[in-house]
Structure formats: C-alpha cells, structure tokens
Image (tube, rainbow, N blue to C red):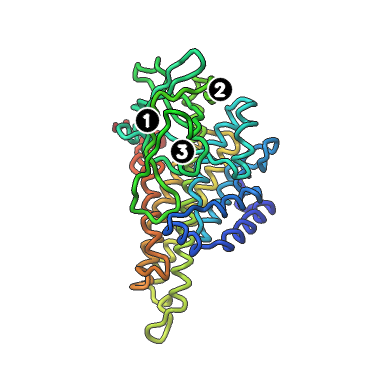
Amino acid sequence: MSFIESEERQALRKAVRELGKKYGYDWFNQQARSGGHTTELWLEAGKLGYLGVNLPEEYGGGGGGMADLSIVLEELGAAGCPLLMMVVSPSICGTVIARFGTDEQKQRWLPGLADGTTIMAFAITEPDAGSNSHEITTTARRTEDGWSLTGRKVFISGLDVAQAVLVVGRTEDARTGKLKPALFIVPVDAPGVEYQQIEMDLISPDKQFALFLDDVQLPREALVGSEDAALMQLFAGLNPERIMASAFAVGIARHALGKATAYVKDRQVWKTPIGAHQGIAHPLAQIKIELELARLMMQKAAALYDAGDDLAAGEAANMAKYAAGEVAVRATDQAVQSLGGNGMTKEYGVASLVAAARATRIAPVSREMILNFVAQHSLGLPKSY
C-alpha cells in the first residue's frame, strides 16, 4: 500500500469531485425534502463509469477495486451528495455476484450495476435477529423447479428504486443452530414480494423499508454461489459494505468540516474572525486529525481487500467503519456549534447532516458490535455474547 495515490486515482478523485460540485448539497437536500430521488446524479455517475469502477471490465466495469469505489463515494459525499445505494448495489451485490456468481448471473446483472441502469438492494437485517445474524429465520425451501423463500426483513435501503434485492436466507437443513446462510437474487416485482416504507426522522432521498417474502417462488439460478459456502460469500460482501460505509461517513465529515471552516474564516464578531479563537480552531483541528486517521484505515482496509486478504480486511474494515462513524458525528456536531444559531438554520444546511452522521454509528453495523469484534478477534479477549 502506498500513501501516494496513483495518477489514475488522483484523476478519478478530481473528476468525481467535479461531478459532485455540479449537483451539490443544495440539490441533494432539495431531493430529500421533496421526496425525490438522486436518479439524475446516479445515472450520470454510472454513464461516466464511476459506479462500476470496481467491477470486471468484461461486464462493463472499470476493473478496479474497493479502493477506487471508495474514492467515488467519499468525493460525492464531500461535495454534499452521498449516494447511499453505492454502499449496496455495486459494492455488496456487485462484488458478491462478480466473485461467486455464474457466468449467466454476471452477464445478467453486472452490466446494469456498472452503468447504473440496474439497482440491487441487499436484505440481511431481521426484526427479531437484529445484529445476531445467527438468528436469521428467512428460510429457503427446495422445490421441484428451484426455491421457495419466506421471511421478513427490516431497514432495507432503496427498494423503491431497485429492480432486485440480494436476500440472505437460510436453507432448511440449517436448523441445527449453525449459521448457514444462502444468498438469493429476488426481483422486487416477483409474486409474494411486498415492501412498506419505514418512516424515518432522516432528511435523506434514500428510503428505508420492511420487506415481506411470502412463499416467493424462485428458479434454481436465483441462488448465488454455493449453498454450503455462503458464509464465506456473505463476508465477501460485508467487508466491502463496511469499507463503503466508511467512505460514506468520511465524505459527510469532510463536507461538514468544510462548511464549518469556511464559515469561521469569515465570521467576525469582534475584531478578528472567530476561527482565530482556539475554542473554535482546536476542535476543528482535532476533527481534521481524526478524519485523516479514519481515511487511512479505510484505505488500508480497501487495499487489503483488493489484495485478496479477506481476514485482515475484515479487521481493518471494522476499525475503519468505527473511526469514520465517530468522526462524522463529531464533525457535524462541531459544525453546528461553530456556526452557532446559523448552524440550526435551513439556509446553512448543517443541522440536517447531524442525523445522517449519527446513523453511521449504527448502520450497517453498530459501534458496539465492532468493539465486540475487536475485543474478541484482535485482542483475544473472551466472547461476551
């Protein structure tokens, strides 16, 4: 891993930054408040090759890796346009299909995921299982023609804009208690599929849904990869998810810090800009340091994943997600504080970032579960749950 980005990645970062500025936070916020979507930006990013930069070239992707895709999301977030479905569609779903899908599945799904014309959601969380994926009850039963899938999922992003959803279920012979997930591609318009929006106190164009699967009939080719190796396949998707969630949080933190520093450079109450006062300057400087540290861990996680070291990438991706979530919360809170009363106004667009940043501490994995992981796997401490 080099601490100096290649010329290609520097060019990618610059190009995506310009695309983000073309739309900007005001546009993104308007879409969110009006109930709209980010379709225009999504499709332009896909047409320019940014959404599929991590996917294989033979299927319309850029042939890069998670390091490249994380740059795209980070820069869009820093410009005020964090595309949440990038964490899901090209990252989790695209990666799993590219690594474990059949040739037919790759040909069917990857070109659309790469150019943005297809969006795929991801469904793992269940109302009774929470963070305990071992308690997933969504069940896949073999039928004469394929599979029957029944279960319920919650907090599933983007079902209203997705054409399909990658569902984590369990095969029936996994009732011994041992986790044996299996991954299925389910069209959102298939008979037996229903979803309902969950009302959230978030100002976001990306909606959350409860997903209901009632005896959904699927062909044999709906199964992605091997039924018996799905745990490995699941983690192959969750590590990119954590890397991209880190990019999402880092982008928000950069955007908030940029707004705060711009304001305190110009805002003058006495004889000098308020940014000259250490009570304002030091917290922002601390956030800058924490932000750079979070980015470094995210870049390390991406480099390890792209190098094929899934085990080491898992540890680094969890740490990156923790660090990025923490700095996103601190950055948005300090931005509001630095702007004072203006920080609470719609005009300055800072307070609206707080809830989105706070969500990065919770999803896609909570900071408490990350601390459990680090305590057990990194420090060798006894399992607490």
Q: Position of residue 201 (x, y in %)?
A: 33, 53
- Label 1 sits on a secondary structure element that is helix
- The circle drawn on residue 133 is 1
Q: Which of marks 2 and 3 is in front?
A: 2
Res. 357 image quadrant: bottom left
Mark sitting earlier along the chain (2/1)? 1
Q: What residue type is labelled 1?
A: Ser
Q: Residue furthest bottom?
A: 271
Q: Position of residue 111 (x, y in %)?
A: 64, 38
Q: How far apart are marks 2 and 3 (CA)?
A: 32 Å
Identify the residue shown where x is 34% and y is 32%: 132
Residue density around tag 3, few if under 14, some if 14–19, many if 20 or more, within 10 Å? some
| Dot 2 and dot 1 residues touching (CB under 8 Å) | no
Q: Which amino acid does label 3 sit on?
A: Glu
- The circle drawn on residue 40 is none
Residue density around tag 2, few if under 14, some if 14–19, many if 20 or more, within 10 Å? some
| Dot 2 and dot 3 residues touching (CB under 8 Å) | no
Looking at the image, residue 138 lies above or below residue 346: above
Q: Which residue lies furthest to the top in this view?
A: 144
- Label 3 sits on a secondary structure element that is helix
Q: How far apart are marks 1 and 3 (CA)?
A: 18 Å
Looking at the image, residue 58 lies above or below residue 71: above
Residue for badge 3: 315
- Label 2 sits on a secondary structure element that is helix
Q: Looking at this view, is 64 or 138 the one in front?
A: 138
Q: Looking at this view, is 142 or 5 the one in front?
A: 142
Look at the image and tell me whether residue 46 can be seen.
Answer: yes
Q: Position of residue 380 (x, y in %)?
A: 37, 33
Residue for badge 2: 221
